[in-house]
Image (cartoon, rainbow, N blue to C red):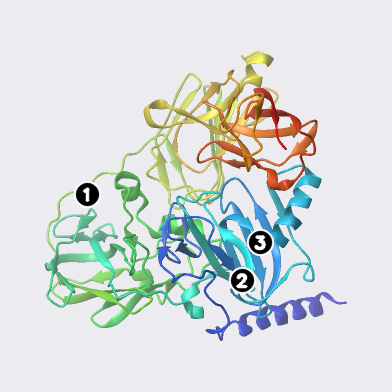
């Protein structure tokens, strides 16, 4: 087959997928829970380094609610991990969409048996499976799992997604998954940014907060701004939905100048490949210093986000001397509730106060070029495109520590840090790792690659990094049993495992020499084996658990328990 024909077929398939999903079905997917939908998190919500890719549906502050297939299809993927979505299930539907169910407590009996068989065969808790289309078929409303709090969940809830044929998450509201919402978004603050070198607002060339006056109709009006040159705006806004106190994300923002569209921000769909560019959507420096996100209503030069629509001049306004303007921002939730902000602007060329000078250092990084430095036995490699903007970096070295800029500049792709460890003995190097120094200098493990006399790690957060040695093994203690105890009434055995420095890397448990499955919940440092696995065949059982940390220190715990 010719390459031209292959490309033609590929293009045809791609077009078919897109066309098939241009008419979004609004009656195919059903509520995946038997309770009214109340949200703890909305689609597109701004999270750390990513957009929220689904709905977080409240489960009445408890675990164990039946999770139902939202539509006909088959289980196409099962992913069980300690972090992230924890226990997660993926259903492929005949219309090309995929639904995702995350943070589950356990699966339906049929699916649970399917998974357990393979977990025991591979002797691992963390597992990723891709069942064939004819193995685990489901109909809409079938029980597939029970809600939980596994993985990176901050409390019991169901994470629910709908993805298109290209595995891009889409807003479930588009499919008729309705959520009661009678409340308009909340405007926390608005900010104006002089962009051009000669631009100013009220005599200043720096970012400043816009004073907003609330009006009786729920809208806001700003005090008139005196400005000239290229300026842009940002807004800090969230939305509350009925039945919950959570500050959730908004659905859409429209910006207009004198009635003409300037920019739209819309959360209908995005791709996982682009989601980290959220750090260009927000004012990252402000977030780093204030733990509050300002959404930029303008597009930075290297920002590829698809959530921006119809950006005229990238959302940047060119204010001319002696002209008057009205800038309007309309913030909406999916239910159509809205808040309007009106900002009158008077073009006025005046002598402005000096802007805050840029602090120049010896380390200037052009975002379009790779950059590397080496000093004091520590080397840095910054690939092209790791930074969004050209940046002067504040870098210093002291002993085995690098003070590597302040975390007010976002990193897109991994920067590599390397440490020369040739001065250390083989025994020392075995127990050492690269750590990021956090609050009060507390070290935290960074995944460290060791090759001879060089340690390396990839980082996506600026800060202070150093070499640390961990010579202490993890600790293990039983929670619901004691050595030599009869535990016939127990449904499980539970142990607590901790490591005070490099962190838990792996664990393995056996009873009477045979592997048993133990679920690790890092949020409360517990390992649990459920006796429903039916792997125990003796009355007297000898448990052996080995826990290893990230530098290879291992701790062994042994105990005998009796069970009928």
Pointer 2 with pointer 3, Cβ within 8 A: no
**Which residue corresponds to mark 3?**
108
- Of mark 1 and mark 3, the one earlier in the sequence is 3
Helix or strand or loop: what does disc 2 sit on? loop
Helix or strand or loop: what does disc 1 sit on? loop
Pointer 1 with pointer 3, Cβ within 8 A: no
Task: Tell me if 535 is positioned left or right of 68 in this view.
Answer: right
Task: Tell me if 370 is positioned left or right of 56 in this view.
Answer: right
Tell me the distance, in whole angstroms, between the alpha carbons under discs 1 and 2: 57 Å
**Depth check, front residue: 350 or 181:** 181
**Residue 80 position within the rendered picture, expressed as x and y whole percent measured from the top left:** 65, 51
Tell me the distance, in whole angstroms, between the alpha carbons under discs 1 and 3: 62 Å
- Of mark 1 and mark 2, the one earlier in the sequence is 2
The answer, for residue 348, to whether it is visible in the render is no
**Which residue corresponds to mark 2?**
69
**Residue 226 position within the rendered picture, expressed as x and y whole percent measured from the top left:** 13, 65
Q: Residue at x 28, y 70 (%)?
A: 317
Neighbours of disc 3 within 10 Å: few (<14), some (14-19), many (20+): some
Neighbours of disc 2 within 10 Å: few (<14), some (14-19), many (20+): many
**Residue 197 position within the rendered picture, expressed as x and y whole percent measured from the top left:** 28, 57
Q: Residue at x 55, y 49 (%)?
A: 151
**Which residue corresponds to mark 1?**
355
Neighbours of disc 1 within 10 Å: few (<14), some (14-19), many (20+): some
Asked which quadrant contains residue 434, the reply is: top right
């Amino acid at each position: 087959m010719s390459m031209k024909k292959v490309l033609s077929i590929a293009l045809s398939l791609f077009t078919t997928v897109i066309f098939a999903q241009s008419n979004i079905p609004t009656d195919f997917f059903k509520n995946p829970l038997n309770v009214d939908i109340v949200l703890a998190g909305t689609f597109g919500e701004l999270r750390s380094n990513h957009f929220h890719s689904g709905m977080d549906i409240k489960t009445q502050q408890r675990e164990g609610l039946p999770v139902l297939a939202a539509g006909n299809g088959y289980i196409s993927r099962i992913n069980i991990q300690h972090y992230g979505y924890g226990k997660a299930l993926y259903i492929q539907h005949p219309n090309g969409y995929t639904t995702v169910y995350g943070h589950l407590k356990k699966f339906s009996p049929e699916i649970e048996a399917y998974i357990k068989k393979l977990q025991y065969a591979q002797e691992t808790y963390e597992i990723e499976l891709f069942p064939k289309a004819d193995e685990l078929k489901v109909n809409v409303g079938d029980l597939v799992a029970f809600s939980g709090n596994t993985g990176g969940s901050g409390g019991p809830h169901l994470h629910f997604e709908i993805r298109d044929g290209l595995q891009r998450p889409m807003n479930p509201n588009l499919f008729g998954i309705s959520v009661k919402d009678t409340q308009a978004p909340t405007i926390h603050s608005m900010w104006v940014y002089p962009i051009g070198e000669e631009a100013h607002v009220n005599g200043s060339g720096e970012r400043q907060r816009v004073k907003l006056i609330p009006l009786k109709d729920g809208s806001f009006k700003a005090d008139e701004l005196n400005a000239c040159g290229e300026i842009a705006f940002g807004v800090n806004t969230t939305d509350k939905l009925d039945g919950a106190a959570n500050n959730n994300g908004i659905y859409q923002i429209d910006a207009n100048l004198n009635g003409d569209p300037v920019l739209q921000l819309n959360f209908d769909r995005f791709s996982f490949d682009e989601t980290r560019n959220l750090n260009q959507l927000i004012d990252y420096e402000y977030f780093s210093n204030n733990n509050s996100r300002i959404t930029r209503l303008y597009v930075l030069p290297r920002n590829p986000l698809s959530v921006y629509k119809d950006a005229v001049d990238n959302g940047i306004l060119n204010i001319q001397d002696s002209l008057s303007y009205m800038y309007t921002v309309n913030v909406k939730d999916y239910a159509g509730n809205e808040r309007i902000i009106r900002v009158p602007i008077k073009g006025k060329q005046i002598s402005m106060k000096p802007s805050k000078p840029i602090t120049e250092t010896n380390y200037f990084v052009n975002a379009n070029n790779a950059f590397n430095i080496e000093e004091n036995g520590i080397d840095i490699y910054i690939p092209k495109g790791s930074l969004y903007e050209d940046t002067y970096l504040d870098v210093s070295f002291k002993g085995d520590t690098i003070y590597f800029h302040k975390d007010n500049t976002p990193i897109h792709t991994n920067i590599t840090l390397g440490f020369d460890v040739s001065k250390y003995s083989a025994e020392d190097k075995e127990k050492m790792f690269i750590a990021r120094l956090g609050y009060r200098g507390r070290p935290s493990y960074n995944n460290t690659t060791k090759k001879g006399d060089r340690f390396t790690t990839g980082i996506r957060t600026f800060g202070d990094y150093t070499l640390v040695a961990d010579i202490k093994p993890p600790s293990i203690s039983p929670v619901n049993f004691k050595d030599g105890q009869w535990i016939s009434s127990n449904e499980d055995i539970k142990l607590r495992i901790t490591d005070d420095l490099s962190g838990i890397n792996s664990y393995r448990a056996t009873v009477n020499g045979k592997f048993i499955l133990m679920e690790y919940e890092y949020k409360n440092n517990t390992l649990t084996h459920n006796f429903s696995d039916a792997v125990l065949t003796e009355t007297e059982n000898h448990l052996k658990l080995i826990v290893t940390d990230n530098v290879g220190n291992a701790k062994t715990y042994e105990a005998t328990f009796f069970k009928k």
